[in-house]
Amino acid sequence: QVQLVESGGGLVQAGGSLRLSCGASGRTFSSYTMGWFRQAPGKEREFVTAINWSGGNSYYADSVKGRFTISRDNAKNTVYLQMNSLKPEDTAVYYCAFAYGTNLYSIWRAYDYWGQGTQVTVSS
């Protein structure tokens, strides 16, 4: 079992920044990919970004490319999502996700464990 705990969400004005964190605990002894997804009211959960075990490779949805940056600190079993130039359409609950392996998965079904989610609200 792996437990994920997100933090860092909140309310911000358009153009502002937030940094989300996700700490992993439990069976994290092997290589794993970390991802971020988001879900807005009435919409399906959508992929935001993912990062591989070494942190050397990452993948972003087109909607956040150039504005969001994913990073990880394996010594702390923590992944971060730096969100800059936020837009009202970024408003959603953001979830971090854990998948054993080294691929950069963009499909939510590929992930084995999920955090509880943290709300991000961007006002116009």
Image (cartoon, helix red, strand yellow):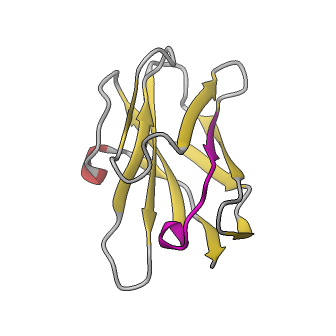
Where is residue 51? Give x, y as percent.
45, 29
Position in image of residue 120 (x %, y %): 63, 68
* Residue under the image location 37 percent in, 54 percent down: 63
Q: Does residue 96 appear to the left or right of 50 in the view shown?
A: right
Q: Nearer the viewer, residue 24 or 45?
A: 45
Q: Position of residue 54 (x, y in %)?
A: 50, 14
Above or below residue 122? Residue 73 is: above
Q: In front: 115, or 36?
A: 36
- Seen from the viewer's position, the closer of residues 87 and 27 is 87
Residue 86 on the magenta span: yes
Q: Does 112 sit above or below residue 76?
A: below
**Coordinates of residue 49 in the picture (x, y in percent):** 42, 42
Quadrant (top left/top right/bottom left/bottom right) for the C terminus:
bottom right
Numbered range of the magenta stretch: 79-92
In terms of image quadrants, where is residue 72? Answer: top right
Name the residue: 55% across, 66% down.
87
Magenta-span inclusion, residue 29: no
Counting the numbered discs, the total is 0
Can I make out residue 92 in this image? no
Q: Is residue 34 above or below residue 67?
A: above
Determine if residue 98 is in view: yes
Is residue 112 left or right of 77 when viewed as pictured? left
Identify the residue at horizontal 45%, vertical 62% (top origin): 38
- Residue drawn at x 30%, y 72% as measured from the top left: 44
Dividing the picture into quarters, in which one does residue 104 lie? top left
